[in-house]
Amino acid sequence: MEVGVSLERAIELACATPMARRSEILSLDEARGRVLAESLASKVDDPRFDNSAMDGFAVRAEDCSENGAVLRIIGISQAGGEMPPAVSAGQACRIMTGAPLPSGADAIVMVEDTSVEGDSVTILGPARPGFIRRRAENLAKGHEALPSGASLTPASLALAATMGHGEVKVVARPRIAILSTGDELVPAGSELNEGQIHESNSHALASLVERMGCEAIRLEAVQDSLDNLRSTLDSLADCDAIITSGGVSMGEFDLVRKIMEEEGDIHFWRMQVRPGGPPLFGTWNGTPLFGLPGNPVSSQVVFTILVAPWISHCLNYHNELGPRLARRIRVRLQDSVRGAPGKLCLRRIRINSEGDQLTASTHTHQGSGNLHSLVAHDALTLLPPDTNAEVGQTIDALWLS
Ligand code: AMP
Ligand code: MG
């Protein structure tokens, strides 16, 4: 077991014990919001044929060099209709947006720039080759436009459909159990007796787990007793991973750490970060287990910086296009922020856009029990150990999504 590791080392150690990646084939309807398990290549050219970007007339540009040219209308090209007749010198063909370009035509005049009388059209504006959408100009058949590990967002679902895929192979959602520990915890909505508080971490963690493309199995909190903890952990053998919160510090009742030390296998304990110093990672009967701190802010921060990258690694998510909870940015501080001795410091900040810069401000106190600080802010500083940052300084931060 390593004790007091850097965030980078913690991620490295956790990634050495991944959970399995499985895949399944789903229809596009079922695949919304899922993650591709293999790259998707286009089965077709997009567009499939040269077509018009405008409602108007398909013409030969050379016939329209003079304003007021009169051309004979020889037919119509409709989206989904029959192939239109060829256009010869002095002729024009009505054409609708998305309809195939008649052979012989090399430009489109917008309907707004024409005047029609009987079967003649007078050309009153430019004939533009640029109004023709050329075959395969978006995507050629065989092009891998959607990489493995990309999220099926609204745009990528539509692109998969455009490319001809009615079904896609996606990453199966691993089952991740979420277990809060603490004698003081009762479910939200229940009456509080003396010394009790509403359990909140499991709700945040379940939501974070789902946003990382996994299935959250949220359990009721367990009491601080080794027997309860052991039997609950043993009941989770069919889960792919376990996330606990609470009970990993130095206290007498910090039993997650104790039971993992005595009966499980701890790979590291404590991380050089603030908030969120005491997490542990290891296995319980072979199942990867993250022991997150109980403090509400700490549990979410540690999930974001440690568990989310582990999930991305295990499930082979695409760096830019896969599910993620945060993106690294540079921001100029509007308020000073205090760092932490020997620890990477993740203060909560709010990102604003000012001129050509992102700036950051603080709005609440930064206690690791103050959940409001995570609601009122939308980013975390990445202040290196032993550094404070002053107003006007530009620093690294994680913009939470
Ligand atoms: P612990 O890590 O168990 O010492 O808990 C640290 C602090 O977080 C204590 O104030 C706990 O009451 C609080 N806490 C622990 N777990 C939860 C939870 N699931 N929901 C809300 N607060 C919690
Ligand atoms: Mg506790």
Image (cartoon, rainbow, N blue to C red):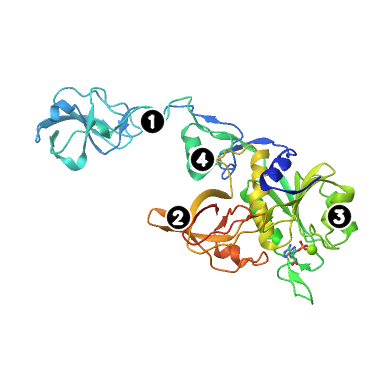
Callout 3: 10 Å neighbours few (<14), some, many (20+)?
Answer: some
Alpha carbon of mark 1 to alpha carbon of mark 3: how far?
62 Å
Q: Earlier in the sequence, mark 4 or mark 3?
A: 4
Q: Are marks 4 and 3 in contact (CB under 8 Å)?
A: no
Amino acid type of the residue that numbered disc 4 sits on in the rendered structure: Leu
Mark toward the start of the polypeptide (2 vs 3): 3
Q: Marks 4 and 3: which is nearer the front?
A: 3
Q: Which amino acid type is shown beneath numbered disc 3?
A: Lys
Q: Which mark is residue 157?
A: 4
Percent of width and height locating residue 332 = 47, 56
Pick the front one: 333 or 22: 333
Picture layout, residue 223 above or below residue 315: below
Q: CA distance from mark 2 to mark 1?
A: 39 Å
Query: Can you identify the residue that label 3 sits on?
Result: 258
Query: In the rendered image, which quarter contains the N terminus?
Result: top right
Instruction: Assess whether mark 4 and mark 2 are in contact (beta carbons under 8 angstroms).
Output: no
Q: Residue 51: percent from the left, percent from the top? A: 31, 31
